[in-house]
Amino acid sequence: MKKFNIAVALVALAALIVVPGFLKNYGIHLFTTWLVFIIATMGLNLTVGYAGQKSLGHAAFFGIGAYTVAIFLKAGLSFWLALPSAALICFATGLALGFPALRVQTIYLAFATLGFNTAVWLVMRNEEWLTGGTYGINNIARPSLGGISFDGNLAYYHLVLFFTVVLALALWGLLRSPWGKAFTALRDNPIRAESLGIDTRGYTLLSFAIGAAYAGIAGGLYASQVQFIDPALFTVGASIMMYLMVVVGGPGYFLGPVLGAAVGVILPEWLRFAQAWYLFIFGAAVVMLMIWLPDGLLSIPDRIKARRQSREASAARSAAANAAQGVQR
Amino acid sequence: MTDFLQLFFSGLSTGSIYALAALGFTLLWQASGTINFAQGEFVMVPAFLMVGLMASGLQLYVAFALSCVLSVILLGWLFKRGLVDPLFKYGMMPIVVATIGLSIAMRNLVRAGYSAEPQPFPQVFPEKIFEIAGVTISAGDVGTFGFAMALVLLVQAFLNKTVTGRAMQAVAQNTESASVLGINVPRMIFYTFAINAVLAAAAALLVTPTYLAKFDMGEGLGTKAFFAAIIGGFNNSRGALLGGLIVGVCENLAAAYISPAYKDAVALVIFMVVILFKPQGLLGKKVERKV
């Protein structure tokens, strides 16, 4: 089973490397955006799905990352310096925001992050000297490394794919480490985790900050991909959309963001002609999903398995009961 | 000084609208543990109901009365039966996510099904201006503040003075004991949803003349209502009033004296300060975590 999973992952990766080569520019653009949002929602999945912290300000970190890279590149600095800086700034901001917000639980964090998103958006819109205000920043360059230029759309796609795979492996490693176990312990029962000696505060803060750093990297990659950013991309609405991507895909499932980002990025592009109606149906679908499948789309296999197991168990029980009756007779 | 007073009074009028939305929000939370992320859209929908009813030739006040009734049915009964009841057993977060979905759905239904353009809305109060000791106050501000205050006090009186209101409070404080005492818990919870719907319709009547009816008008309003509710104290309905007024006044003062561009960040700053020093809110009681 294990080997089978690895084989599937390799086939999927090969497909992701090869397939966009046959697509037109627009298709490559869609795939790249999808990957960027996978990175961002992977981080959010760590915060929301694994550590159980409700963050509704992820687009703010995404935006901080995007603006950091854009401003660095405009100042003539290297992309390879800008991208780690974006991650670092987001990590630090995550710590600074999480510190007061995590004093109080669950829903307060949601509101604090939501308000934080508004504040960041206001800074982007109003501080023209830094961010260009509503005009945004355009002509953001694409990087090159040691003579290889990532200027072409396909080359840039492969760069983003590389980052996605590396970051996914990093997250996978993190989740399997004792740290990762501490995160899930935190989500499932914070008080028990605390009494087992887990530094609840430290780990929540860390999960939040790492999630923010992922968003920062995604934002930085996005800035170079679309080459033009303005504040409208990083509103509270965008944050809520990212949160819904995680919830729809399945929070706490490793592949949840892959599916969630597809629902949130690729579907709306296909259904662009009916945008407002699409969003209406999307909103209504989220309501239905919560009622019938509160753990997200990826919980379907688990549900089927659980149902089969319970059916088998009840069949075994009734068989045992029949057998017992037979003995009595 | 006169400037300050003028800003203060117009802030009170905005704040009283926030207080209406925040009050409904806390009532829902107390009675059923529902955090309604669609609270802003709950104001937007009655606004469009009124626009639609007036377009078919009805007077403003008839339209308002009718949209109150429709709100109770749609945003009270249907919301409770269709969304909150089935999700209640899963806890708080699924309801939060579902109401987020609901807010997206409602906003875009109006946008795609009615209009994406802002719709004009008649003035509710006469456009007169008073001058008292050099301070100019508009009749609209006085009327808004008075109407909102009257409603809030009426709800308070209903909750504290009538048998039904006290039964609703009992349900909010301890659902099990309330049902043991023979209180019809589901009905009391429905009353809360109905009151929330009426408060939202009233907020729509007061806010739409200045904001205009637009599909995304609820976005800012809902967030302000959350912050107001938490600043005042999440488990205290008087807190919503205090929080709403504080946010309204501070926003207005900050817009004039600090920077109009950062007006929308004021509620956040107050909120952050409050949860740092008094997480239960200004008037709230501390609740221990349950193991």
Image (cartoon, rainbow, N blue to C red):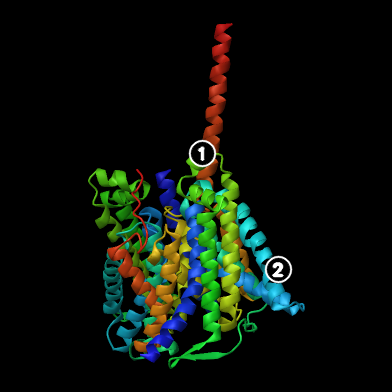
Quadrant of the rendering where the C terminus of chain A is positioned: top right
**Local SS, label 2:** helix
Is residue A124 something that shows in the picture?
no
Q: Nearer the viewer, residue A225 or B124?
A: B124
Q: Nearer the viewer, residue B91 or A295?
A: B91
Label 1 to label 2: alpha-carbon separation: 49 Å
Q: Nearer the viewer, residue A187 or A219?
A: A187
In percent of width and height, residue B16 lies at 49, 74
Which mark identifies residue B66? 2
Q: Chain of mark 2?
A: B
User: Which residue is situated farthest in the front direction here?
Assistant: B133
* Residue position marked by numbered label 1 in the rendering: A306
> Residue B105, located in which quarter of the rendered image?
bottom right
Left or right: residue A183 versus residue A322 is left
Categorize mark 2 by other alpha carbons within 10 Å: few (<14), some (14-19), many (20+): some
> Residue A266, located in which quarter of the rendered image?
bottom right
Q: Chain of mark 1?
A: A
User: Which residue is situated farthest in the bottom direction here?
Assistant: B134
> Residue B213, located in which quarter of the rendered image?
bottom right
